Amino acid sequence: MPAIFAFKCSCCGELHEGSPSIAFTAPDQYACLSDEQKARMGRLSSDFCTIHHEDHTDYFIRAVLEVAIHGVEEPFLWGIWVSASKTSYERYWETYDNPIPGDGFFGWVCNSLTPYPWRTSRPADVCIQLNGKRPKVVLHRSEPEHDPLVLDQLNGISIARAQQIAEQAIHGVSRPSLNVPSKAGG
Ligand SMILES: [Zn+2]
């Protein structure tokens, strides 16, 4: 069983080594603002983001969503943003350098994870990690369970599926077959 994930990409022909890691520099809500709006309403750093509207403020935190790859040590990593309440955001901010074990909060996933189907809202538990690691996103099980991303996080994915998702995430190739979730473990 391979400990390290590597594949020859069918899109660009190059060898992509290491488990895939796809990161977003901002939540979609920030990314879709105009430059003028970003300057006027937004604040963005590597781990924190706020958008100030006239009557309220939206708070976002950078986190990681892991999907296990069967037979590979390192998971498929999505560096994503989650929404947070003001209270959760401020607590994370205040305990950033000295995180409290067991801490966590509720958040919504705030990035569209192509090639997974677009969802307006994916609810999740966000679990604080120690040792300088970003908080870990644990998606809520969907009802009914037809969200391929939820199923993939729950069951893990095959190396072949990890390769397919990575190629599409890296190169933006759209293949509708991916929208059909595959049950693992059969
Ligand atoms: Zn490639």
Image (spheres, rainbow, N blue to C red):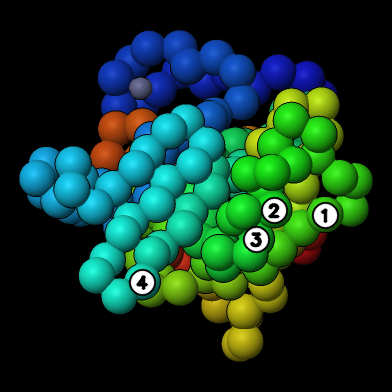
Q: What residue sits right under mark 3 in the picture? A: 88
Quadrant that contains the C terminus: bottom right
Counting from the top left corner in percent of width and height, residue 45 is at 43, 33
Question: Which residue bears the numbered disc 2?
Answer: 91
Q: Alpha-carbon neighbours of circle 2 within 10 Å: few (<14), some, or many (≥20)?
A: some
Q: Which is closer to the viewer, label 3 or label 4?
A: 4
Is residue 172 at least partly visible in the picture?
yes
Name the element at disc 1. loop
Which amino acid lies under the numbered mark 4 shown in the image of this protein? His
Mark 1 → mark 3, Cα distance in angstroms: 10 Å
Cβ of mark 3 under 8 Å from ligand 1: the answer is no
Marks 2 and 3 in Cβ contact (< 8 Å) = yes
Residue 91 vs residue 9, the one in the foreground: 91
Q: Residue at x 54, y 29 (%)?
A: 20
Asked whether the residues under the numbered discs 1 and 2 touch, taking CB atoms below 8 Å apart as contact, a structural biologist would say yes
| Badge 2 element | helix
* Cα separation between marks 3 and 4: 16 Å
